[in-house]
Image (cartoon, grey):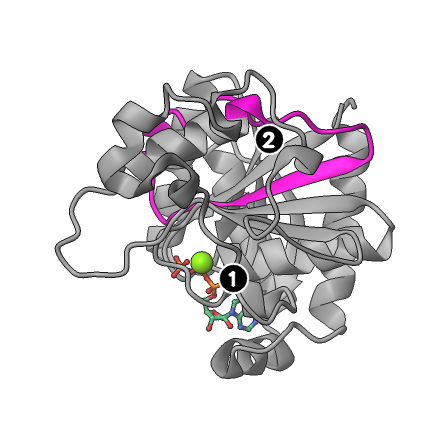
Amino acid sequence: MGMKISVCGKGGSGKSTLVGLLAAAAQARDLTTLVVDSDESNSGLFRMLGFNEPPIPLMALVGGKEGIKEKMNQPSILSETNITLEQIPDGYINEKNGLKLVSIGKIHQALEGCACPMGVLSREFLKKLRLAKDEIAMVDMEAGIEHFGRGVDNSIDVVLVVVEPSFESIALAEKIKDLAAGINKQLWAVLNKISSDNLIDEIKTKLKCREMETIGVISYDASVFHAGLKGDTLIQGRATHQAGEILEFLLTAIKR
Ligand SMILES: Nc1ncnc2c1ncn2[C@@H]1O[C@H](COP(=O)(O)OP(=O)(O)OP(=O)(O)O)[C@@H](O)[C@H]1O
Ligand SMILES: [Mg+2]
């Protein structure tokens, strides 16, 4: 069976960037990768992944936020017990060279209300998602920890927590570690925006003291920053190479 990875961390720590880098690394290895955009506030992930437009949110399949409670029980792909990638209707999944993208839903308007129905849909979709052996799903989570409370992480195989060099990022990673442990999930840390080797040792040690193992480092990379600024696709460079090493680790470490 394929693996489901959730990418969590503090706002702005680099979750979407890491998802983009890992997806590119998986693509380079001819693995089919499904990126699940589970962050309602993300607007540029599709561009980062090289798509011209976003997929129609899965929320639309269940009638938008208004209708979600009633519609979840009515026939639609989301009422299936299992969902394979082939079953996702055209328009709701973007595809390019083995890279696929689905989006749970977006909040477009201020005061549109609670994001909970999106949490419910993320949770149900990930639970029902059936992956083939050579398929990987990577979930770009919303910042913070609320998705744990909504059970979104219950059916994933591993939690990656992105840690940037800040006290808050490390403190949040520790909370995420406790929540992941509470649902028996493997958690590993990935350092991001690292500008020196000394910093790697310092943060790794801090994380180790908090019982978190670091499996990879993404350097601060000006080309990543500029791609983020322009809303462009990530360019091959040091960061993509480092993400490749992280992917290799995951492929080896996780029993599939
Ligand atoms: N390794 C890096 N080198 C340089 N800039 C980076 C790196 N990683 C991320 N950034 C920049 O940091 C900013 C935040 O990154 P990103 O959007 O990936 O974070 P996020 O955790 O997904 O944020 P959000 O919580 O808002 O979804 C972006 O401007 C991005 O280009
Ligand atoms: Mg993001």
Which residue extends farthest left?
111
Picture quadrant of residue 251: top right
Q: Earlier in the sequence, mark 1 or mark 2?
A: 1
Residue 7 lies left or right of residue 241; in this view the side is left
Q: Is residue 196 above or below residue 114?
A: below
Q: Is residue 147 visible?
A: no
Q: Nearer the viewer, residue 233 or 236?
A: 233
- Residue 197 image point, x, y percent: 64, 64
Q: Is residue 142 visible?
A: yes
- Residue 146 image point, x, y percent: 30, 36
User: For mark 2, what is the residue?
Assistant: 158
Q: Which residues are magenta?
A: 127-156
Picture quadrant of residue 41: bottom left
The residue sitting at 84% across, 57% down in the picture is 28
| Helix, strand or loop for the magenta stretch, by majority | loop
Residue 170 lies left or right of residue 117; in this view the side is right
Q: Is residue 125 above or below residue 105?
A: above
The residue sitting at 76% across, 73% down in the picture is 236
Q: Quadrant of the C terminus?
A: top right
- Residue 107 image point, x, y percent: 28, 55
The residue sitting at 60% across, 54% down in the picture is 19
Mark 2 falls on what kind of element? strand
CA–CA distance in space, label 1 to label 2: 26 Å
Q: Nearer the viewer, residue 76 or 251?
A: 76
Q: Which mark is residue 54?
A: 1
Mark 1 falls on what kind of element? loop
**What amino acid is found at the position of numbered circle 2 in the picture?**
Val
